[in-house]
Image (cartoon, grey):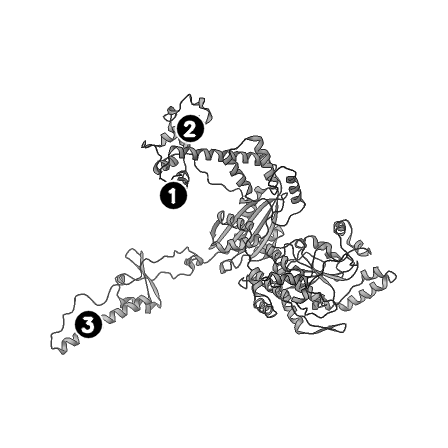
Amino acid sequence: FRQNDPANAAVATIHPSSTIVATITSPAAIMEEQPPPSVNEKRGEPYNVVCTHITADFDTLASAIGLAKLWTLGIYDEHEEEKDEDDDNVKEADENKDEDDDEDTRGKRIVDGPLPTYVVLPRGAHPDVQRFLSLHKHLFPIRSLKSLPGFSDADLKNNHHHNHHDHDRNPQSPYRGLQRVGLVDAQRRDRLGPAEILLPHAKKGVTIVDHHVDAESDIPEAVNYIVEPVGSVSTMIAERLRNAGNARRKHGGFETKVELTEAEATLLALGIHSDTGSLVYDSTTAKDATMLGWAMEMGASQAAIAEHAKPSLSDEQQTVLTQALINVNSTTIRGVTISTVLLSADGFISGLAAVTKDALDLSSSDIFLLAVCYEATRGNRGGGGGKKGKTNGNKHGNNNNNNNNDDDDNGNIDGAESKQTKLSKEAEERLQKVKKSTVKALSGVEAEVPILNKSSARGGTSGSKMINSDSWKGGDVAFQRQRLAATFAFHDTDRSGFLERDEIAVALRSSGFYISQDNFDTVIDSIDENGDGHISFEEFVRFYTEMEEQNKWDKIKADIEGSFTKTPSTMTIIGRVKAGVNVRNVNLNKLFQKFNGGGHPKAASATVKLEDESEAATVLNELVEELIETGLTEQLTVGDFMQSPVLSAKPTMTEKQVEDLFIRYDVRALPVVDDDNKVIGLVSYKEVAAAKMRLANKQEKRLRQMEKAAKQGKPLPPESDRPLESALKGWMKQHVQLATASMTMSEVE
């Protein structure tokens, strides 16, 4: 299990017993090294299945492995065991119904006790989980649907064409041996994906184990519904494993003690880490911390936890994160900063949850919503894939194109490009660079670089007189240079032969362009190739030519996109919320349920089917409006809890006068205001104490002078006209920040 030594990994694969010793003693114990599915497995042999939700994360995987371990040992939930007597009657009736057909009887009987239990990931896993399983999948009883005992591809394809009762009566049905189905970290059918076909065929029903207490289940086959308000389902399973390990249970004369292997303990710890944010999410409970500690006591590998609990982002995920931070839109409402990002991708991108969490951490947001749109017909570039993705690949395979990985849109662009125009080599390179970019802002208005010759039309005819009427003889290039020369001369007001920064600024303003100083400097630096601070005519021509090619490409792109018919799109929305008092009422789980999404109150996701990509912005805006209305309560303002009328001190007050105010009104600070009631400073008890100390030092010094004069028989020193007390304006705090009555508590904090 220790990945740090490749040799150990090789040994573990070839000789599992030499590296990990089995600690379970049971008639149906699963070996540490799971054998490959056997083609000789008989239909009707009893077994159980535990399903994760689609795109499995560490929590659902760990809890599924743990529940499968319990069921393999015949340890079922107490609520289910209360029905054992009734189940025995059903079992006896089934066994007596068809005694002549042994195979049929074996398939119909209901079996309790230790049974082989397999874990099914219905539709893939998160990238970090995939990476973990690529190293350690052989240590767990994980199978695909079609590799379950008696299953085949034909069985899965034909399932929707037959009634499930017909399946159960058919002696050759692959469902004959299915006893129980477990569903962890989910309660709805759409979270099961293709594994939904198993639900009606479980003879002992479906067991749901979840920690989403406010979720609603739509699985009527559920006979055991276990939900607890904890931070992770892995915590619930770990507690049952611990309790089962503390108590010895007997099955058929065999004594069973549950102990965890290093791989199982590590996976449970990863499950708790992932769904509690390493115990920092506000949904974390004391039980989560206790069970994480227990998993560590059972031998969880801290090295593996450190490697997989916080994996690095893939190149594709880093691209999405970069685009998200560049195109983020933030607004502060009721003291809460909400950030939204709407991106468009060439296909499905996996691992967006990790991207959203990093974006939330890197930004100053309290709520972060990341939405990524992609056409439903495009291939899955993020590891999911499907028939449509394969079709696109085959299509490009037939083209004489070196880049066979381009998606369908890129192929269409190539075709349209060759029909409309021939771009220059530089523009062609820019085109290829754009085609390689898979993630961009959706419907974002890109900053247009101003074209300086726009103002020449407003300059009357003075510029046009400089254009040679015979310039057409030199072709379009010569005519263009003549036109640019006229524009250049028009804006070169000092006739220096160069365009200065102030001249360009005037040209931009007269053309109606208003940009920030930073953007202005960026534009100038991009034009000024030699960095001398002046724009020569040749630099001006090259800049204009590049912009003309860019506009030409934009027009081609617009024509191509305009020729496309509207196609259905899919939008994936991931939401994350920082812990805090101001967002305690935000519940993303309920917010996303309208799209059959869900998750946790502070971390949820949804998939929205759109008729066209243009609907995405509207959907996201409606979500934000609903979030503000339902989740963000009006916060108290300073005016709601401030003292009124406001006590204040005058700058001419002395130490004694200020101290009297503090004592009389029992305050520890006061604003200092002038005659116009304008706040000019602040005085607190610290300043008063320091001022009193200085005053005491002055008085003591004056007393020592008098004592010294008396001893020497000299006359007492005359008292100074300057009083010992000092005015408040000399020792108050200055340059203080002010809070208005309309500020919220979070803003003041």
Determine whether 464 is above or below 725 in the image. Answer: above
Residue at position x 63%, y 50% in the image: 384
Residue at position x 76%, y 53% in the image: 152
- Contact between marks 2 and 1 (CB within 8 A): the answer is no
Quadrant of residue 47 within the rendered picture: bottom right
- Numbered disc 2: secondary structure: helix
Q: CA distance from mark 2 to mark 1?
A: 29 Å
In x, y percent, where is residue 338? 50, 52
Q: Residue furthest bottom?
A: 711
Discs 3/1, front: 1
Circle 3 Cα neighbour tier, 10 Å, few/some/many (<14 / 14–19 / ≥20): some
Q: How many marks?
A: 3
- In primary-sequence order, the first of circles 3 and 2 is 2
Discs 2/1, front: 2
In the picture, measured across the screen, residue 268 lies left or right of residue 678, that is right
- Numbered disc 3: secondary structure: helix
Q: What amino acid is labelled 2 in the image?
A: Arg
In x, y percent, where is residue 419? 58, 31
Q: Give the labeled residue for mark 3.
A: 702
Q: Give the labeled residue for mark 2.
A: 481
Q: What amino acid is labelled 3 in the image?
A: Arg
In x, y percent, where is residue 600? 58, 58
Q: Give the labeled residue for mark 1.
A: 517
Relative depth, front residue between 493 and 562: 493
Instruction: Assign the N terminus to one quadrant of the image.
Output: bottom right
In x, y percent, where is residue 132? 61, 58
- Tell me if I can see residue 212 in this picture: no
In the picture, measured across the screen, residue 69 lies left or right of residue 654, that is right
Q: CA distance from mark 3 to mark 1?
A: 61 Å
Circle 1 Cα neighbour tier, 10 Å, few/some/many (<14 / 14–19 / ≥20): few
Instruction: Assign the C terminus to one quadrant of the image.
Output: bottom left
